[in-house]
Image (spheres, rainbow, N blue to C red):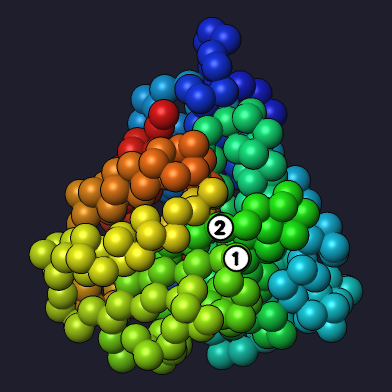
Amino acid sequence: MGTRQTREVTVIHQAHDILRVYSHPACLAHENGPHHPESPARLRVVLEGLRTAGLRWVEWLDAPLATRSQLERVHTSSHVTQLLDQDLIEPVWLDADTGMNAHSAEAALRAAGAVCAGVDAVLAGKALRVFCAVRPPGHHATPTHAMGFCLFNSIAVGAAWAVNQRGLARVAIVDFDVHHGNGTQACFEQDARVMYLSSHQRDLYPGTGLERERGVGNVRNLLLPDGSGSQAFRAAWREALLPDLNAFAPQLLMISAGFDAHRADPLAGLQLDADDFAWLTRELVACAERHAGGRIVSALEGGYDLAALRESVVAHVRELQP
């Protein structure tokens, strides 16, 4: 199921009414191999869910390709070259979890390009909020390595574009994926212009994101024990992470939207449901309205139970609607 460059907006609205969704058929062609949890089916159910959710004033656009210049604001040129300049006939494995086929480079370029395009759209006033329905996910990709299903760090590429090319002084990245976004933290832990806040399950892949990791005062990690549910998750955000986010007063809010903290997810042990993701999204929208003119760019990360992923993404995007 692909996207078309058509607007599903029946009347002319102000930009503050518009939610943009970026995706691209190339993101469905990337494969990690048979029986891999990060499969094209994930994106198919997301697109089907959003298409049938009755969302208001949605503008669907094809994700553009990220440029090498955009990628190299966070990734080394050798990493970019390694992924883009392979002429793949047979699939290859980059590590035990992360594969590429002949279509993977374009998919990763479209994923990063979607986030950069989303940043430009909200900063130019063409939309208030953006959701990037893309894969592969990105938040584990470090400046030098692909890992954890991730090739390029799409959310980091977009944040770097916002501060370096668009001149923002304060961009916040919120990450509620059940796994710590080690790559995103590595990209910005020495850059005070970008705040990174993450809740994630303790003692889970990739084993990073300890609470003592604070960067230059711009990193905040909160670990949740295996089995934690709604009460612990909401308390973590209400009492610790959201106050830090509001104190930072971001000019743009970006979200690594992973839904593998859902109770049905096979790769983790937290006990959340779609209502928890909806609750946090409402809180983030309120923060963005308070400090950032309402501007949010969100990008899909994890989530590996198909029914839970579909339900959770729809709950998240409903709350993003202006």
The residue nearer to you, when weighing 235 against 226, is 235
Reading the chain from its start, which is encountered first: label 2 or label 1? 2
Q: Circle 2: is it few (<14), some (14-19), or many (20+) Cα within 10 Å?
A: many
The kind of residue tagged 1 is Arg
Across and down, in percent, residue 284 comes to 35, 49
109 or 187, which lies in front?
A: 187
Which residue occupies the foreground of this view, 84 or 37? 84
Query: Mark 1: which secondary structure?
Result: loop
Q: At 44% from the left edge and 60% from the top edge, which residue is drawn?
A: 248
Q: Position of residue 318 (x, y in %)?
A: 35, 36
Q: Is residue 181 in view?
A: no
- Marks 2 and 1, Cα distance to the nearest angstrom? 6 Å
Cβ atoms under marks 2 and 1 closer than 8 Å: yes
| Residue 161 location, quadrant | bottom right
Q: Amino acid at mark 2?
A: Val
**Quarter-of-image position of residue 105:** bottom right
Q: Residue furthest top?
A: 11
Q: Is residue 52 left or right of residue 237?
A: right
Which residue has dot 1 on it? 193
Instruction: Name the residue at 22% across, 54% down.
Output: 276
SS for dot 2: strand
**Where does residue 175 sit, x and y in percent of width and height?**
42, 65
Q: Position of residue 25 (x, y in %)?
A: 66, 46
**Image quadrant occupied by the N terminus:** top right
Q: Is residue 218 visible to us here?
A: yes
10 Å crowding of disc 1: few (<14), some (14-19), many (20+): some
User: Which residue position is annotated with label 2?
Assistant: 171
User: In the rendered picture of this protein, how many numbered marks are placed on residues?
Assistant: 2
Q: Is residue 120 left or right of residue 317?
A: right
- Residue depicted at x 77% and y 54%: 165
Q: Residue at x 84, y 83 (%)?
A: 78
